[in-house]
Image: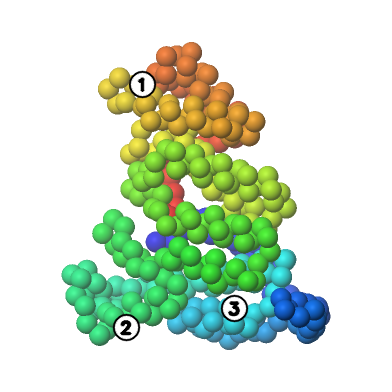
């Protein structure tokens, strides 16, 4: 299943393959027992990395393993070059993974049948081992298999080659990927967990206003806030019979207002809460006013990301 959020990557990836200048830096390593400084010259090797990318077959899933090993063991990039290296890898990774998802049942019908009936033999084990080596797991949604990234894969791959904003971004996504966000238009995490995600991404955008991951971070911030304010097609914020705001949602709103009153989402939630309060927390069209005022949308009738 293709992910909508990575449509944002198209603009970020453009221009990443321009030749980078060789940058020599001196790295000082201080011994704990001796007062010596060892100096060694290190060169940025983004050119070599992009050449490797160009040489690999994006439709061969094992290419991801080759890239991963290079990034962990040989790549040396920092700051903006690290962000460029990440975006190039991300584009390659999801092109390869999505192609495998789309072609799994067509190219590998026998393997697919075995997977559906949980049959385990040498072919299945070899396939699952390859996925693991490539940082992928096998998932199912609406009765169909798809492959997607393991929760900590991007973080573990780039933790030593990342700018501060990229490292923080990957840490946040690492935590989120461990829990399914939604499926079949239904929220699968608690409202308090959803509130935590809103706070985290709002703080990230505040701490790193110029991050290259701004489009993605803003996507997560908005989709979580919109879900928090409007629910989903199969997750209502109001009791279906009484049309009164659910107690767990009311409690979560109050907690956010008390804990983060001066944040942008805190002020939005406060304004909506006060409108609800004046109407005895009964469902009304008041949310439309809030959404229009803050340029937000209802999280209904859309295909959100799963994890």
Q: Which of 79 and 104 is in front in this view?
A: 79
Q: Return the residue at label 2.
A: 126
Residue 107 visible here: no
Q: Which residue is drawn at 49% across and 27% down?
A: 254
- The answer to whether residue 237 is above or below residue 51 is above
Check disc 3 and report its element: helix, strand or loop. helix
Q: Earlier in the sequence, mark 3 or mark 2?
A: 3
The reply, left or right, for residue 125 in relation to residue 255 is left
For residue 211, the mark is none
What quarter of the picture does the C terminus occupy?
bottom left
- The 10 Å Cα crowd at callout 1, few under 14, some 14 to 19, many 20 or more, is some
Label 1 vs label 3: CA separation? 53 Å
Residue 156 position in % (x across, y down): 53, 69
- The answer to whether residue 157 is above or below residue 216 is below
Q: Earlier in the sequence, mark 2 or mark 1?
A: 2
Q: Return the residue at label 3.
A: 71
Q: Residue at x 69, y 48 (%)?
A: 207
Q: Which of marks 1 and 3 is nearer the N terminus?
A: 3
Residue 122 visible here: yes
Q: Return the residue at label 1.
A: 244
Q: How many tags in the picture?
A: 3
Name the image quarter holding residue 289: top right
Q: Nearer the viewer, residue 278 or 41?
A: 41
- The 10 Å Cα crowd at callout 3, few under 14, some 14 to 19, many 20 or more, is many
Residue 67 position in % (x across, y down): 55, 80
Q: Residue at x 39, y 45 (%)?
A: 189
Check disc 2 and report its element: helix, strand or loop. helix
Residue 65 position in % (x across, y down): 48, 80
What quarter of the picture does the N terminus occupy?
bottom left
Viewer-side label of 1, 3: 3
The reply, left or right, for residue 79 in relation to residue 189 is right
- The answer to whether residue 167 is above or below residue 85 is above
């Amino acid at each position: 299943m293709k992910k909508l959020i990575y449509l944002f990557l198209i603009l970020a990836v453009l221009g990443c393959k321009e030749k980078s200048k060789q940058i020599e830096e001196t790295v000082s390593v201080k011994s704990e027992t001796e007062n010596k400084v060892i100096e060694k010259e290190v060169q940025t090797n983004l050119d070599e990395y992009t050449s490797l990318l160009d040489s690999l077959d994006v439709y061969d899933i094992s290419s991801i393993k080759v890239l991963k090993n290079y990034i962990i063991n040989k790549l040396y990039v920092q700051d903006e070059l690290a962000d460029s290296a990440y975006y190039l890898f991300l584009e390659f990774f999801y092109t390869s993974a999505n192609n495998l998802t789309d072609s799994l049942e067509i190219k590998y019908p026998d393997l697919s049948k075995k997977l559906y009936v949980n049959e385990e033999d040498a072919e299945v084990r070899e396939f699952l081992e390859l996925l693991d080596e490539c940082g992928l797991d096998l998932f199912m949604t609406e009765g169909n298999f798809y492959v997607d990234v393991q929760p900590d894969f991007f973080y573990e791959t780039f933790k030593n080659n990342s700018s501060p904003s990229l490292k923080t971004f990957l840490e946040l996504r690492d935590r989120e990927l461990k829990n399914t966000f939604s499926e079949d238009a239904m929220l699968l995490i608690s409202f308090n967990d959803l509130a935590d995600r809103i706070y985290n991404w709002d703080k990230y955008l505040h701490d790193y206003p110029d991050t290259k991951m701004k489009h993605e971070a803003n996507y997560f911030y908005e989709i979580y806030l919109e879900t928090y304010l409007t629910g989903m097609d199969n997750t209502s914020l109001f009791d279906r019979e009484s049309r009164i705001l659910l107690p767990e949602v009311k409690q979560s709103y109050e907690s956010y207002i008390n804990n983060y009153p001066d944040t942008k989402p805190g002020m939005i939630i406060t304004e909506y809460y006060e409108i609800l309060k004046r109407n005895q927390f009964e469902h009304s069209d008041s949310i439309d006013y809030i959404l229009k005022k803050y340029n937000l949308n209802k999280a209904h009738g859309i295909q959100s990301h799963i994890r």
